[in-house]
Amino acid sequence: MTRSFRGTRLRLVATHEFAKGLHEIADGVFAYLQPDGGWGWSNAGLITADNESLLVDTLFDLRLTNDMLDSMSGPLNGRPIKTLVNTHANGDHCFGNQLVEGATVIASEASAAEMEDLPPAALAAMMRLDLGATTNQYLLDSFGAFSFDDIEPPSIDQTFTGSLDLQVGERTVQLLEVGPAHTAGDVLVHLPETATIFTGDILFIEGTPIVWNGPVQNWLDACDRIIDLGASTIVPGHGPLTDAAGVRQVADYLCFLRSEATTRWASGMSATEAARDIDLGSYYDWLDWERIAINVDSMYRELDPNHESADVLALFTTMAELKASRNG
């Protein structure tokens, strides 16, 4: 089991500057980074071989994905993308799929099913709702930079459960399902040859993880698995490149919040009351700390199968209010 490292908090040392764009992190292996790593600003990856390439995730809208693909034109010269792997179902990791023409799109079986739950049109509709000034401003700040128009819902060509080994030229790429955790079907993309791993949203570095699904223990087990693989370069779903210390910080946050939420659940507090009551301490310094509203609600669902979770719009309203009250 992953231990809590709350008493030994470490400052992450990024192996690359957290700058937007394409970074070569091993021979023919690239990370595409998007500061600041907050809502929608996800990372992606590219693995090239002699005559083909594999893309890890697309981005939240067509403009961003097109810009990313343009930045990859050099490495892709003579090495077309033949395989696209989506690490999970969230739109900021798959809404640009339609621009990767001719590729075989692979995801876990659970992710493929979950992609149908929140199509691009639903996000576009959410942005047009009148939810009150505070929530509307929060949604605008979080998602106003993205366009959800003209996006076709992701289509998956091949699914798997457990694990799947792929060949990209002479390179072996391991797909390792570790969900349900962040979402229903999270996948790690491991490249043993270069000791590199793309984690999807199992890792948010210098930002607050979001427990959409859980259970938390699966997420902690996924953190252990990342460390056990011994990768020297770890590409998170959001935030700068990291190492084992960054993985432990994510596990530390989840352990801390699970303990705090459990105490308040046992005392009879509602999930919303608990989210307002918990003192995050130094975790307030993490980007999007107000996601505690989602995380506590998910943890209550684990503690009590009869817990009625708030709907997504109510959770966003709680996050907006939490952030506004602290900023005020």
Image (spheres, rainbow, N blue to C red):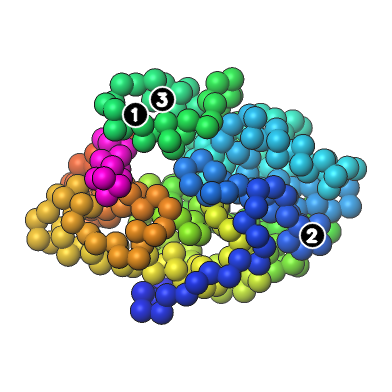
Q: Which residues are magenta?
A: 314-328
Where's residue 80, x and y in %? 83, 41
> Are there few (<14), some (14-19), or many (20+) residues within 10 Å of tag 1?
some
Closer to the camera: disc 1 or disc 2? 1
Q: Secondary structure at mark 2?
A: strand
Q: Is residue 226 left or right of residue 312?
A: right
Closer to the camera: disc 2 or disc 3? 3
Tag 2 or tag 1, which sits nearer the N-term? Answer: 1
Image quadrant in which the N terminus is located? bottom left
Name the residue carrying label 1: 136
Q: Is residue 157 visible?
A: no
Three-letter code for the amino acid on which mark 2 is drawn? Arg
> Are there few (<14), some (14-19), or many (20+) residues within 10 Å of tag 3?
some
Where's residue 304, x and y in %? 19, 53
- The residue at 55%/55% (across/down) is 239
Verify whether residue 318 appears in magenta.
yes
Tag 3 or tag 1, which sits nearer the N-term? Answer: 3
Q: What secondary structure predominates along the stretch shown in magenta? A: helix
Image quadrant in which the C terminus is located? top left
In the displayed orientation, state which residue is furthest to the bottom: 8
Q: Is residue 19 left or right of residue 209?
A: right
Label number found at residue 127 = 3
In the displayed orientation, state which residue is furthest to the front: 328
Tag 3 or tag 2, which sits nearer the N-term? Answer: 3
Q: Nearer the viewer, residue 19 or 46?
A: 19
- The residue at 62%/74% (across/down) is 230
Q: Secondary structure at mark 3?
A: loop
Residues at marks 2 and 3, CA–CA distance in whole angstroms: 42 Å
Q: Are marks 2 and 3 in contact (CB under 8 Å)?
A: no
Label number found at residue 171 = 2
Rendered image quadrant of residue 280: bottom left
